[in-house]
């Protein structure tokens, strides 16, 4: 199986690929009430669009846990968009068409998209095969000491820890309808922590530069720091894709009071991320684990800094704790 797409399998003739993407499609169909509940389907960018006959049959928990699904967002009364990583959605859509016998129809969803509606968006942290390998190795070592079980048990434990810490490893917030007359009301004490590419490899990626702390340790630190600072909610989101980071910033408008942001390498390249940050106008703290200003010349440039009231660098993951506390102080909490 390809580590990048999760769709390529044992042989080069594509036999395993068809089986895998069809299984993903079957899981999605089961979660939306079965193929009999599908009225129309289509794809847009990394989203699989499905129009259901009876929206009450959609099991969102089941949909969230389906393989390859990064998240979902409801569109209209009967529509739902399922988010996949780049390279997966086309293959899964082909399988959906084959299983339902319904060809894609973008016109149906163009109508739905024009109707404002309040939706909940739910996005998972993206995974990385190297991190998965590290977890497997960690489990093997733990099994030898008799302290834990499988990789699935570890992932389940992470979800439990996140839920108990007044937050989630998933991005979960309201996507309110646009209103030109009035801006959305601000939330009360909610902080969004956004991490860009390769941050999910903490503990594996160049530990002499980024330290030995794992990404899991960073998540727990953020939730603990948010509680200490008085936030009622701390949500952590990570993606290796620029567009996902822009979406997260845009969707935070009206739902979060401020953002702690480590764009990773996009710090030095992305004007689009800067534009998104300026557009929403939320208080933002730029964070870097290493001392970026003392590294390579290309790391001296920070586009996101123009949208931030503070930059914290070189404190390791403890920089996030300072950022969260400074954000709370900036908000007058």
Image: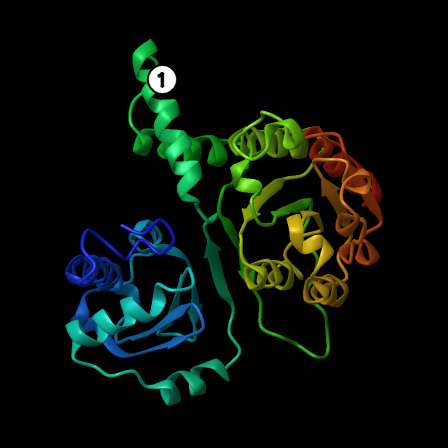
Q: How many marks?
A: 1
Above-or-below relation of 297 to 159 = below
Above-or-below relation of 132 to 247 = above
At label 1, counting other C-alpha atoms closer than 10 Å, the crowd grade (few under 14, some 14-19, many 20 or more) is few
- The residue sitting at 74% across, 62% down in the picture is 274
Instruction: Give the image's coloring scheme.
Output: rainbow
Q: Nearer the viewer, residue 177 or 292?
A: 292
Q: Quadrant of residue 5?
A: bottom left
- The residue sitting at 43% across, 68% down in the picture is 46
**Can see residue 130?**
yes
In the displayed structure image, the side of residue 297 where residue 152 appears, left or right: left
Q: Nearer the viewer, residue 130 or 190?
A: 130
In the displayed structure image, the side of residue 259 where residue 30 appears, left or right: left
In the displayed structure image, the side of residue 185 where residue 58 appears, left or right: left
**Can you give x and y, in whole percent of width and height, for residue 43 in the image?**
37, 75
Position of the C terminus by quadrant: top right
- The residue sitting at 47% across, 30% down in the picture is 161
**Can you give x and y, in whole percent of width and height, for residue 189 in the image?**
69, 44
Above-or-below relation of 77 to 218 = below
**Can see residue 146?**
no
- The residue sitting at 60% across, 62% down in the picture is 251
In the displayed structure image, the side of residue 100 where residue 297 appears, left or right: right
For disc 1, the marked residue is 141
**Can you give x and y, in whole percent of width and height, for residue 8 in the image?**
26, 56
**Can you give x and y, in whole percent of width and height, for residue 27 in the image?**
22, 57
Which residue lies most toward the top here? 145
Q: Quadrant of residue 314?
A: top right
Above-or-below relation of 174 to 111 = above
User: In the structure shown, which secondary structural element does the residue marked by tag 1 occupy?
Assistant: helix
């Amino acid at each position: 199986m390809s580590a990048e797409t999760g769709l390529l399998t044992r042989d080069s003739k594509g036999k395993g690929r068809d089986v895998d993407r069809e299984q993903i499609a079957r899981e999605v169909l089961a979660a939306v009430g079965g193929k009999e509940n599908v009225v129309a389907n289509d794809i847009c960018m990394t989203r699989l669009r499905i129009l259901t006959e009876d929206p009450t049959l959609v099991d969102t928990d089941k949909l969230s846990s389906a393989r390859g699904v990064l998240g979902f967002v409801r569109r209209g009364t009967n529509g739902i968009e399922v988010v996949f990583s780049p390279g997966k959605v086309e293959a899964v859509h082909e399988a959906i068409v084959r299983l339902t016998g319904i060809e894609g129809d973008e016109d149906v969803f163009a109508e739905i998209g024009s109707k404002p509606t309040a939706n909940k968006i739910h996005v998972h942290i993206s995974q990385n095969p190297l991190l998965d390998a590290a977890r497997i190795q960690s489990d093997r070592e733990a099994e030898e000491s008799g302290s834990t079980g499988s990789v699935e048990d570890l992932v389940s434990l992470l979800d439990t820890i996140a839920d108990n810490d007044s937050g989630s490893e998933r991005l979960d917030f309201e996507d309110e309808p646009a209103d030109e007359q009035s801006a959305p009301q601000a939330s009360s004490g909610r902080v969004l922590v956004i991490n860009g590419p390769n941050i999910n490899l903490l503990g594996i990626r160049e530990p002499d530069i980024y330290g030995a702390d794992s990404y899991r340790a960073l998540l727990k630190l953020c939730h603990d720091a948010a509680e200490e600072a008085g936030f009622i909610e701390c949500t952590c989101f990570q993606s290796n894709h620029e567009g996902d980071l822009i979406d997260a910033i845009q969707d935070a408008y009206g739902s979060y009071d401020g953002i702690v942001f480590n764009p990773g390498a996009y710090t030095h390249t992305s004007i689009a991320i800067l534009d998104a940050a300026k557009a929403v106008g939320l208080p933002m703290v730029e964070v870097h684990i290493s001392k970026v200003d003392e590294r390579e010349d290309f790391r001296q440039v920070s586009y996101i800094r123009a949208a931030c009231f503070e930059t914290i660098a070189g404190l390791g993951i403890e920089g996030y704790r300072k950022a969260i506390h400074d954000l709370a102080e900036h908000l007058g909490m």
